[in-house]
Image (cartoon, grey):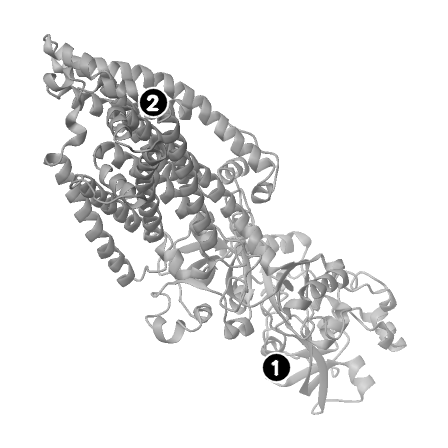
């Protein structure tokens, strides 16, 4: 009590055994004991006593401690000296009559209770036997929850004390106190939070990332391939009607009218084809949904998925598709109508064979911009510190593909350069290479179709990963740990300490000679791609000092601003040290800034939290905390959460109790047995142990599923490419029937002619595959540089080999079928 005032008011007084009022503050090391305790111990003022007590350790364990105090006086068993309300009431203790009936929420050895203790409890309850100064109490028993458990208020005016006035006066004073507290500490605003539940749920149901944009981006190659194929088919149709177009121009039809008629015919076909494509799109989406409910169910975790058709989306897709095809048809019709009428009357459309002029300039520009711009952009990205950014090099791949295609266009425009000399199969191959430039436009379109499809396929395949056969070392996504575990009920015992394991009922060496790393968990939303909803408050993991000092795991990026400018020296070797940084407070809000680390995929696609940005959370005390992303992990087991230092977690989120996540570094050959034993012995805690390989594979099931769907888009593009290649081959054979018949008459055998035509297509096929693969590897250079050992090179090579084999088979089948028709009528038709 404060000297004067409170004690004199009769609210509660510390009266000494001699009848005096003790009203001075206690100094450090001083203590008061009550008369009952003084008589039992035989001590008085001036004596020193040793007191054994427990403190709460860092791992929430009770640590024995001893303190020595000097008795300054003995308190009588009246007023505050016998007030049991000075001690915070514990459920299961304060509400029972006998100490033997205690049911405390913590372990107590009831066998140490004496009869004298029962008598004291019956007479005085929880009245304290020892009273120390406030600073002594704070120094010994402060925890992350705070340093004060009870506040007592006494009226300064004795006239309004309960013993000196009526209840109306006291109740009025109590009302004034309550209102004053409410004004000084607006607890309602902090403790009572209103949430728009329906709006929040609908917002979260939108999902963390709009993957429609990703599908649209990956479909650009398919759209371009379809447009080129439509242009190729329409041009072939125009070539078939060249004499009709020439006749219309010759009799006086305006060129604009002729082009408009061709455009109207193409528009009608585009409109009808768009309807067929719309039905195909619905069927394709239905197949994807069926796959997500069956084969790919691990990626979404539920079979309760249905296809939702939005009329506005269907209309927009239909209109966009028709407009794209109309644009290609209009371009082809305009070029056809600009041809000389004389040439058209002869059945010739010469624009495709132009050697110079505008097409040549455009090819040179594309080759120059692509082949020079791609390396310059790559150098700029590397110099800017984005050499390991998975998506930064995508423009480099596009530029390289444009440059290589421009180079192919220039090469095709040079002509044959004369007939090759020699005999045998080699001469046939050289003749096939020479014939590739006879129809530059058709050949270039075929190469573009194959290159675009291979670009899409290789790009997608490079990001696919299977962790089952990996050696997960310290710098991998597993950090050198073989097992990862979660406990539904947090463990308060130290799992690495023999005593802690004994209390948990574990063996002396449950880790087969390995070690365990325990992490505190603040429950929250799953931030991994396994969560179909938008996380609002992600799960937080407290990283202990041992794990920070140990290091490990592969990092993708570091925020150098948060590193304080010394990332190359102090942080690069162990980026976990970033969690130890003091980032101060936000000058605008005054909220503390806490450094956190997250998985790159989760922060980018699920949380949408860029490196160096803040995520604002509110703790149980109503305080705002800003979590700043200072580094990202590459392909880690920590995709569900954000990681911060353990002391920061306890400081700002003190309600986090026990340890809910564990990492085990055990011998690889014993991982299965260790996991099974831990799950068995810790089953009451809901202990779930998973191999890190399996955890990584589960996280990447979603990524691999999306990649599989993207791969189907590449497959459709490849189908269009091979279809275009077959059309070009058949068209070329039909146009050259007279030439082939003449070669047959001069002694060329039919198999040689089949080989000649097939090799012409194989050259285009090889160019398309090579350009697409090289450009794709350039586009994923950041990912390859960061995880070259994780790229499925064998699968990529096998896919390209299969593409070439299928294209070769189709080319051979088309050539063989076309050359089976009699060539003699074609030879007779030659003039």
**What residue lies at 37% left-to-right and 20% top-to-bottom?**
273
Q: Please state if 255 lies on the left or on the right of 720 as rendered.
A: left
Q: Mark 2 sits on what residue?
A: 319
818 is higher (above) or lower (below) than 486: above
Residue 629 in the image: x percent, y percent?
42, 59
| Residue 358 quadrant | top left
**What residue lies at 83% left-to-right and 65% top-to-bottom?**
102
Residue 276 in the image: x percent, y percent?
42, 20
Residue neighbourhood size for the residue with mark 2, other residues' Cα within 10 Å, grouped as few (<14), some (14–19), many (≥20): few
Q: Which residue extends farthest top?
A: 251
CA separation, marks 2 and 1? 85 Å
Q: Mark 1 sits on what residue?
A: 26
Residue neighbourhood size for the residue with mark 1, other residues' Cα within 10 Å, grouped as few (<14), some (14–19), many (≥20): some
Q: Which residue extends farthest right?
A: 115
Q: Please state if 635 lies on the left or on the right of 343 as rendered.
A: right
| Residue 301 quadrant | top right
**What residue lies at 27% left-to-right and 14% top-to-bottom?**
265
- Element under label 1? loop
Mark found first going from the N terminus, 2 or 1:
1
Answer yes or no: is residue 176 visible. Answer: no
- Element under label 2? helix
Residue 787 in the image: x percent, y percent?
43, 60
The quarter of the picture where the N terminus appears is: bottom right
Answer yes or no: is residue 548 visible. Answer: yes
């Amino acid at each position: 009590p404060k000297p004067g005032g409170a004690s004199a008011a009769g609210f509660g007084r510390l009266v000494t055994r001699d009848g005096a009022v003790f009203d001075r503050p206690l100094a450090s090391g001083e203590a008061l004991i009550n008369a009952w305790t003084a008589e039992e111990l035989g001590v008085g003022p001036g004596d020193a006593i040793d007191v054994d007590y427990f403190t709460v350790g860092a791992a929430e364990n009770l640590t024995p401690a001893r303190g020595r105090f000097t008795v300054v006086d003995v308190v009588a068993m009246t007023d505050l000296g016998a007030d049991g309300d000075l001690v915070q009431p514990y459920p299961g203790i304060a509400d029972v009559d006998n100490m033997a009936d205690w049911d405390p929420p913590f372990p107590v050895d009831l066998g140490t209770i004496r009869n004298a203790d029962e008598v004291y409890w019956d007479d005085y309850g929880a009245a304290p036997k020892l009273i120390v100064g406030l600073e002594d109490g704070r120094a010994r028993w402060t925890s992350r929850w705070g340093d004060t458990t009870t506040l007592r208020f006494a009226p300064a005016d004795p006239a309004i004390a309960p013993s000196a006035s009526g209840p109306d006066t006291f109740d009025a004073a109590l009302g004034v106190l309550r209102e004053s507290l409410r004004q000084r500490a607006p607890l309602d605003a902090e403790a009572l939070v209103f949430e728009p539940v329906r709006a929040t749920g609908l917002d979260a149901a939108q999902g963390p990332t709009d993957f429609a944009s990703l599908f649209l981006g990956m479909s650009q190659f398919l759209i371009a391939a379809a447009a080129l194929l439509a242009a190729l088919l329409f041009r072939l149709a125009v070539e078939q009607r060249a004499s009709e177009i020439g006749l219309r121009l010759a009799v006086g039809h305006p060129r604009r009218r002729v082009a408009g008629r061709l455009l109207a015919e193409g528009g009608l076909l585009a409109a009808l084809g768009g309807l067929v494509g719309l039905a195909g799109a619905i069927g394709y989406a239905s197949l994807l949904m069926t796959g997500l409910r069956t084969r790919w169910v691990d990626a979404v975790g539920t079979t309760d998925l249905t296809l939702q058709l939005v009329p506005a989306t269907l209309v927009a897709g239909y209109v966009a598709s028709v407009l794209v095809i109309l644009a290609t048809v209009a371009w082809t019709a305009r070029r056809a109508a600009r041809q000389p009428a004389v040439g058209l009357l002869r059945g010739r459309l010469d624009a495709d064979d132009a050697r110079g002029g505008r097409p040549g300039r455009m090819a040179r520009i594309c080759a120059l911009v692509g082949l020079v711009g791609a390396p310059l952009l790559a150098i700029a990205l590397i110099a800017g510190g984005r050499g390991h950014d998975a998506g930064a090099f995508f423009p480099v791949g596009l530029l390289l593909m444009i440059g290589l295609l421009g180079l192919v266009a220039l090469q095709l425009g040079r002509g044959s350069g004369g007939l090759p000399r020699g005999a045998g199969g080699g001469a046939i191959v050289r003749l096939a290479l020479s014939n590739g430039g006879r129809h530059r436009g058709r050949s270039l379109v075929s190469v573009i179709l194959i290159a675009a499809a291979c670009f899409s396929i290789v790009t997608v395949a490079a990001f696919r990963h299977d962790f089952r056969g990996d050696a997960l070392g310290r710098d991998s996504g597993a950090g050198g740990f073989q097992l990862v575990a979660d406990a539904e009920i947090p463990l308060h015992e130290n799992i690495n300490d023999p005593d802690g394991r004994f209390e948990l009922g574990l063996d002396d060496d449950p880790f087969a000679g390995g070690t365990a790393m325990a992490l505190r968990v603040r429950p929250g939303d799953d931030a991994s791609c396994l969560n179909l909803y938008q996380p609002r408050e992600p799960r937080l993991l407290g990283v202990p000092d041992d794990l920070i000092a140990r290091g490990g795991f592969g990092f993708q990026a570091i925020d150098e601003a948060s590193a304080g400018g010394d990332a190359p020296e102090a942080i690069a070797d162990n980026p976990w040290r970033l969690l130890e940084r003091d980032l101060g407070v936000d000058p605008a809000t005054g909220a503390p800034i806490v450094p956190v680390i997250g998985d790159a995929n989760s922060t980018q696609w699920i949380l949408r939290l860029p490196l160096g940005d803040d995520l604002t959370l509110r703790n149980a005390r109503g305080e705002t905390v800003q979590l700043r992303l200072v580094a990202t992990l590459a392909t880690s087991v920590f995709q569900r959460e954000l990681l911060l230092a353990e002391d920061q977690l306890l400081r700002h989120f003190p309600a986090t109790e026990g340890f809910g996540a564990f990492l085990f570094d055990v011998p690889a050959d014993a991982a299965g047995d260790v996991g099974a034993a831990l799950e068995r012995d810790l089953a009451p805690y809901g202990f779930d142990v998973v191999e890190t390989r399996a955890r990584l594979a589960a996280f990447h099931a979603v990524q691999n599923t999306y990649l599989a769907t993207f791969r189907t888009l590449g497959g459709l593009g490849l189908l269009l490419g091979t279809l275009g290649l077959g059309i070009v081959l058949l068209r070329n054979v039909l146009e050259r029937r007279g030439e082939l018949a003449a070669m047959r008459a001069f002694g060329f055998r039919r198999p040689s002619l089949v080989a000649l035509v097939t090799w012409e297509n194989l050259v285009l096929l090889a160019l398309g595959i090579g350009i697409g693969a090289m450009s794709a590897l350039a586009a994923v250079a950041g990912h390859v540089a960061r995880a070259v050992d994780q790229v499925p090179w064998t699968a990529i090579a096998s896919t390209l080999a299969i593409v070439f084999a299928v294209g070769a088979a189709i080319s051979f089948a088309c050539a063989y079928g076309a050359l089976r028709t009699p060539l003699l009528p074609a030879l007779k038709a030659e003039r």
